[in-house]
Image (cartoon, rainbow, N blue to C red):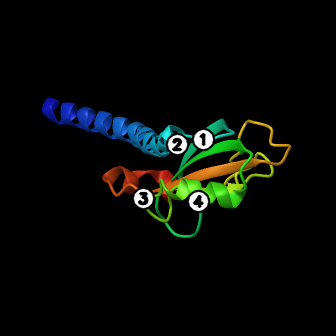
Amino acid sequence: MKIMRIVGIVAAIIIIVGLISIPIINNQYAHSLEEKLCEIPLPKNTELIESISKAGKLNGNGNGMQYFGAILIKSEFSLLELEIYYSNYRSNQWDCLVEVQNDNSIKEIEHELVCFNASVSDTGYYIVYSWGSNNSIFDKLDIRGH
């Protein structure tokens, strides 16, 4: 009876630690997308304003975790020029996408309001973002993906 109690306590501890660590691990994966974008050299006359990452069910229907990393930049370049520049750093169709940023809200995320802290009040602001996927057990067990 004493052994069963110990096994039950150990099992409960493992479950609790797992439930706490799964979102942390998935957040870290999303943060790695943000870090990769921050490591890309900026074009001339371009300033990094802010970076952000998010993990969860961010767009679309159905179940599944999604990972998002982004940087907010201010640049003298046009959207087309920045698109060409960042295409050199793309490893797939979901990396280093560039859009004009007109305010601080991130329109690429549908299911919740995610915003940059910086005030975007002028022209010349752009968001550079990447989507990621992580086919691991942590991806399947995170309740935010359902």
Q: Is residue 10 left or right of residue 96?
A: left
Q: Which mark is residue 34?
A: 2
Q: Quadrant of residue 139?
A: bottom left
Q: Residue 117, how many percent across, how many down? A: 73, 36
Q: Which residue does the numbered mark 3 point to in the structure image?
A: 91
Q: Nearer the viewer, residue 1 or 56?
A: 56
Point 52% across, 69% down: residue:
62
Q: Earlier in the sequence, mark 2 or mark 3?
A: 2
Q: Earlier in the sequence, mark 3 or mark 4?
A: 4
Q: Which mark is residue 84?
A: 4
Can see residue 23?
A: yes
Q: Nearer the viewer, residue 135 or 50?
A: 50
Q: Which residue does the numbered mark 1 point to in the structure image?
A: 52
Disc 3 from disc 4: Cα separation: 14 Å
Q: Earlier in the sequence, mark 2 or mark 1?
A: 2
Q: Amino acid at mark 1?
A: Ile
